[in-house]
Structure formats: structure tokens, C-alpha cells
């Protein structure tokens, strides 16, 4: 049913993404669809710029892409039907933008169990569910 499945990955919390990856593989194998992994890096505030090397963003992007590709290569899923990309900016803004630009028909997000903290502050998962133009599957442990 779903042909283009986008999986946002938080590289600092891979345990949350694992069940989302497993579910995505199952769905994509059924539909002979494609998987795309996306991670969003936060740009440093411009006031820091004079203290860091000019190539910092490039290095950050290369490191994140290498990590995503390592995860993608570890998946039991055909290489030709999977891809990975890194974006810079706000997490849910960039995930929603990637979903639109790539033409995802499903976003699969791993999420913690709801807690008082997420109730009060809100979460990326909640915002993506609310604003995505495609279907969204939230995988909880
Ligand atoms: P919660 O578990 O409380 O719902 P989030 O709203 O941050 O927490 O949802 C976690 C999911 O959000 C992750 O599994 C991942 O899909 C996505 N996510 C969080 N941070 C990033 C990031 N930097 N890049 C890509 N996706 C992210």
C-alpha cells in the first residue's frame, strides 16, 4: 500500500528508531516500496560562527550522512530501494519538508511513551502527525 516511506532518525537516540525501522521494512517489502532515512542536524547559532572552523557544517553533515548510511547498510532491505539524507534546521519543519519534496506517502516515527513532559511541551511526533500531508505511523515501544 505505501510506496515511499520516510523514517526520521534521531542519531542520538537510535533505540527509539529501531522499532520504526523494523515496521517500515515490513511495510515496504509488502508493497515493493522505497525507504528513505532522514536525520536533521541543528545549525549552530550564528554568534558561534567566529569561534568554529568554516568547514564545521560540512563535517557535521558528512559525519551524520556516514552514520545514516551505516544504519541503512545494516538493514535487511534491497540497496536500490533505500536512500538517506541529512537536513539542517528545525526537526519537524525539516522532516515535513523532506516528506513533501521526496513525495513520501507514509512517515514512520519512533516515539517514547507519552509522559507529563511531552504533554506539556509537545513533541516532534505530535507536530508531524498534525501537519503532515501524508499518512503518519507512530511506533511506540
Ligand atoms: P517523543 O518520543 O517524546 O515523541 P519526539 O517527538 O522527539 O519524542 O519523537 C521522536 C522521533 O522524532 C524520533 O524517533 C525521530 O523519528 C524523530 N526525531 C527526533 N529528533 C530527530 C532528528 N534530529 N532528526 C530526525 N528525526 C528526529
Image (tube, helix red, strand yellow):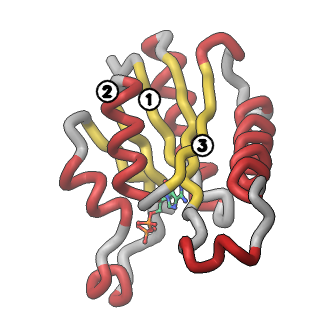
Residue bearing the label numbered 2: 105
The correct choice, above or below, for 24 with respect to 112 in the image is above
| Residue ID at (24%, 44%) | 132
The correct choice, above or below, for 118 with respect to 112 in the image is below
User: Which quarter of the figure has residue 122?
Assistant: bottom left
The numbered mark, 3 or 1, whose residue comes first in the sequence reads 1
Within 10 Å of the Cα at label 1, are there few (<14), some (14-19), or many (20+) other Cα atoms?
many
Q: Position of residue 134 (x, y in %)?
A: 24, 34
The numbered mark, 2 or 1, whose residue comes first in the sequence reads 1
54 or 89: nearer the viewer: 54
Q: Quadrant of the N terminus?
A: top left
Q: Secondary structure at mark 2?
A: loop
Q: Secondary structure at mark 1?
A: strand
Q: Position of residue 117 (x, y in %)?
A: 37, 87
Within 10 Å of the Cα at label 2, are there few (<14), some (14-19), or many (20+) other Cα atoms?
some
In screen coordinates, is 132 left or right of 86? Answer: left
CA gap between label 3 and label 1 equals 16 Å
* Labels 3, 1: front one: 3
The numbered mark, 2 or 3, whose residue comes first in the sequence reads 3
CA gap between label 2 and label 3 equals 19 Å
Q: Position of residue 88 (x, y in %)?
A: 53, 52
Q: Secondary structure at mark 3?
A: strand
Residue bearing the label numbered 1: 5
User: Which quarter of the figure has residue 42?
Assistant: bottom right
Q: Is label 3 in contact with label 1 (beta carbons under 8 Å)?
A: no
Q: Is label 2 in contact with label 1 (beta carbons under 8 Å)?
A: yes
Residue bearing the label numbered 3: 86
Amino acid at each position: 500500500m505505501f510506496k515511499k516511506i520516510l523514517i526520521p532518525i534521531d542519531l542520538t537516540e537510535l533505540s527509539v528508531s529501531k522499532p520504526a525501522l523494523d515496521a517500515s521494512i515490513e511495510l515496504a517489502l509488502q508493497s515493493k516500496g522505497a525507504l528513505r532515512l532522514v536525520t536533521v542536524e541543528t545549525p549552530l547559532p550564528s554568534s558561534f560562527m567566529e569561534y568554529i572552523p568554516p568547514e564545521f557544517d560540512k563535517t557535521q553533515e558528512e559525519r551524520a550522512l556516514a552514520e545514516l548510511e551505516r544504519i541503512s547498510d545494516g538493514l535487511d532491505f534491497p540497496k536500490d530501494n533505500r536512500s538517506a539524507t541529512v537536513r539542517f534546521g528545525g526537526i519537524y519543519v525539516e522532516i515535513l519538508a523532506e516528506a513533501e519534496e521526496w513525495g513520501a506517502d507514509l512517515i514512520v516515527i519512533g516515539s517514547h511513551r507519552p509522559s507529563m513532559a511531552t504533554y506539556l511541551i509537545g513533541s516532534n511526533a505530535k507536530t508531524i502527525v498534525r501537519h503532515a500531508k501524508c499518512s503518519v505511523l507512530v511506533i511506540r515501544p
